[in-house]
Image (tube, helix red, strand yellow):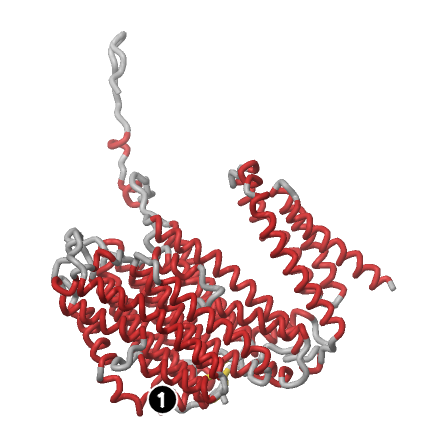
Amino acid sequence: MILIAAFYLFATLVIASAVMVIFARNPVHSVMWLILAFFNAAGLMLLVGAEFIAMLLVIVYVGAVAVLFLFVVMMLDIDFAELRAGFVRYMPLGALVAVILAAELIFALGAWSAGKIDLAARAAPVVTDKSNIQQIGELLYTRYIFLFEAAGIVLLVAMIGAIVLTHRQRGGVRIQNISEQNKRRPEDATRMVDPGVGQGVEL
Amino acid sequence: MTADLMLIWPELILTIGGLVTLMLGTFAGDRQVGLYQVSALLTLAAAAAAVVALFGVETTVFSGTLSVDGFGGFAKLLIYAASFVCIIIAPRFFGGGMRAEYPTLILFAALGMGIMASSRDLMTLYVGLELNSLAAYVLASFMRTDERSSEAGLKYFVLGALASGMLLYGISLLYGFTGTTDFAGIATVLGGELNIGLIFGIVFVLAGLGFKISAVPFHMWTPDVYEGAPTPVTTFFATAPKVAAMALMTRVVIDAMGPAVGAWQQIVIFLSLASIILGAVGAIGQKNIKRLLAYSSINNVGFMLVGLAAGTPQGVEGVLTYLLVYMLTTLGAFLVVLQLRDADGNQVESIPALAGLSQRRPGLAAAMAVFLFSLAGIPPLFGFWPKYLVFEAAVNANLLPLAVAGIVASVIGAFYYIAIIKTMYFDDKSDTEIPAGGGAIVEDAVITASALWLSVIGYLFIPLLAVLSASAAAVLF
């Protein structure tokens, strides 16, 4: 009973905050709603017994991804008036696409509740005497090891891509040169002067 | 595990070679073009040799996530060959702007495409696809100071991300309703009763893959990206990823969705007809040769899908032969485009500027005529043969109306190919001077070889091609 109540609470809040992500006028508010959605999704994960994924959602998505979003959104200089200008013009098309997507989702959900899923056909049968982390780790480093490594290459390519597209050589940069600095003697840098009265110092 | 590693030599070689090339570029500097070029080319050659050495092996590795077989081998050889040529032609085009990341990204893209072509699990499919796509987005905007190139990269990225989203939605539906991501497991479930969730999964997966092969109605990025990207990169986009995505689509459709013919066949037929017709009609008004070749590639993808729609071993053989011939023709055509420079050394891309090319550069014009006639599928040239194969497969699979519609639309397509040939041979000289000579020997050799192969010699290879494509196609059935 309490499980069902908790499920409906979390599920309703996920959907409601996801809707608010889209409808919030201020992008910063959108990110806040997104964080709420992540939290509730983590709650849903807890309910199905995937506590590790629940913690990951909180640590990685809320802790890192959402904060990063927040940084980017705050740095962007967004002109809201301009954003809203095209709204009426694209409204019919947008509404049509939205209706189609909504209909598809409803169909899919209806079918899901009608049809039966044969859970016995799962690639990895659920082993209850092991913890979440152990189960995920065993799958990741045995069955899916090739994909795991390939995903590493994908990240490498993303890194190379970011450097290719943004890195440039700047002129006039003072780079620290330790041997030059150590070679510098006091005589090169300082000068002893003995100015006469009223003559001042020439720098 | 070690035994599995011995069967993925091509992937291992490409990964290590890519890292070595990257390091060479970093430590020797971007000016040492020869050094990292050679390293990248050697890597591709070694990977191709490994593929050849593995011919005849037919098994799955890493708990069935990856398959090692003749079908993947055939596709990988084509992919590596196209990547090889695209690396060779780059330094001359980029000049001082050449950087070591270009061959590196091509190598990693080739790795991703190899994974795509030999995937037999929805997750492998997605990882391979993303590896290839990410490298491709960066390559499209490789000339980042050029406005068109950056625009092409951004467009490709946004639409590619949309396509990935659709594909993932489809994958999640298929996984949710079948309980597995394994192609064989999905096929078992699809053999039973189909529910609407499975059908939605099939539709979304095919839509996501349709983006990658640029089939209508998911083609809209193609002309803009092909026009904006640097020409060597466009050459790459038009050849290797097309082969990989088409091989992947064939594998998904036959291997995973095979039993649900009724569900996917009508989608493939629709994609095929729409691509053939829109590819032919859309090309007519184009003034830019790269845009025109983009529409030509959409049109040709439509013809390949005719073979796929048949869903028979004969149809898949037709698709594979088509891929080989299409790849050679397109490589040749883009290499010709690469040779077109005006007196100042700027690239010429407008079609009216080609007027009178036959007098200034007779050899180049003749080669271009061969490629265009071959793309149009006019009989004495070899481009006719794969078209004949796919239509024959479609007729044998009782898809006569599709074959008839395709043939009618190919006549429309022939119009714009012949219009370019008319411009080159019969129009008055244009103001843009395209001086003779100056072509690199390697590029001229590739153009000559592919033009000769497509004109007559190709027919001598039909028995060999038939054996190769039949053994590759047999893997899927």
Residue drawn at point x = 16 percent, y = 66 percent: B440
Q: In the image, B441: left or right of B460?
A: left
- Residue A1 vertical position relative to residue B124 in the rendered view, above or below: above
The quadrant in which residue B455 appears is bottom left
Q: Nearer the viewer, residue B305 or B63?
A: B305
Q: Taking the image as drawn, is residue B343 in sight?
A: yes
Considering every residue shown, the one lying at the far top of the view is: A198
Subunit that carries the residue with mark 1: B
Residue drawn at point x = 31 percent, y = 68 percent: B415
Q: Residues within 10 Å of mark 1 (few under 14, many from 20)?
A: some
Q: Nearer the viewer, residue A143 or B457?
A: B457
Q: Taking the image as drawn, is residue B247 in sight?
A: no
The quadrant in which residue A88 appears is top right
- Residue A40 vertical position relative to residue B451 in the rendered view, above or below: above
Q: In the image, B66: left or right of A52?
A: left
Numbered circles on residues, count: 1
Amino acid carrying mark 1 in the image? Leu
